[in-house]
Image (spheres, rainbow, N blue to C red):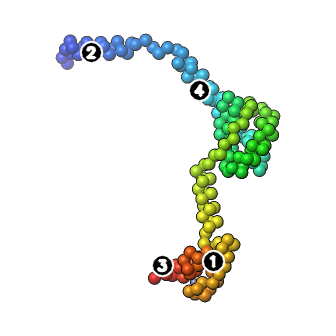
Amino acid sequence: MAVAPDQQRRRLQGLEILQQAPPAPAAPLSDCLDSVSRQWRRDGGLAGLWQDWPAIAGDQLAPHCRPLSLRRGVLTIGASHPQWRQALQYNRLQLLAALKSKGHPVRDLRIQQHHSVNQARLESEANIWARHPSRTDVHGMGTCPSCGRPAPNGEIKLWTVCGFCHRQRLSS
Ligand SMILES: [Zn+2]
């Protein structure tokens, strides 16, 4: 192999000099470890909280709210519905007492509405069912003007005939 021209060797030397740049100061590393351990402690606290949560919040509240974050002693709790957010507000002092008695370092509570995607979907499904034309308990029963059979009023209102006649119309 031919010896590299002078120009190229100078470039290589330049690279070596770059590699030998002074190592990063030690402070950022210890900061990093600090924040990792802070994070660990924080998550550990929240994991413990998750475990104790049903006992702390009680059977009624626990399924409708959950601890979201714990920062500097302030526990943020998400509630699935305004009604449950209000219930949490009312039970704030009892919750704080229960948290302290379980040894959780919580000095204040922040309560906020928290929608998970699933909950939003379930709520919209519940809404659809509440308005569903086949609900006779909502819309009552009537008689289909086409076939004369008893049919849910909601269906007749929506399609002018019962669901069976409507399907028949669609398929013919
Ligand atoms: Zn009909």
Dot 4: few (<14), some (14–19), or many (≥20) neighbours within 10 Å?
A: few
Q: Earlier in the sequence, mark 2 or mark 4?
A: 2
Ligand 1 within 8 angstroms of badge 4 C-beta: no
The quadrant in which residue 90 appears is top right
* SS state under label 1: helix
Q: Which residue is mark 3?
A: 170
Along the line of sight, the residue nearer the viewer: 157 or 84: 157
- Give, as a three-letter code, the residue at label 3: Leu
Q: Mark 1 or 3, which is nearer the eye?
A: 1
Tally of marks: 4
Q: Where 161 falls versus 81 (above or below)?
A: below
Q: Earlier in the sequence, mark 1 or mark 4?
A: 4
Q: Mark 3 or 2, which is nearer the eye?
A: 3
- Give, as a three-letter code, the residue at label 4: Val
Q: Which residue is mark 4?
A: 36
Along the line of sight, the residue nearer the viewer: 125 or 158: 158
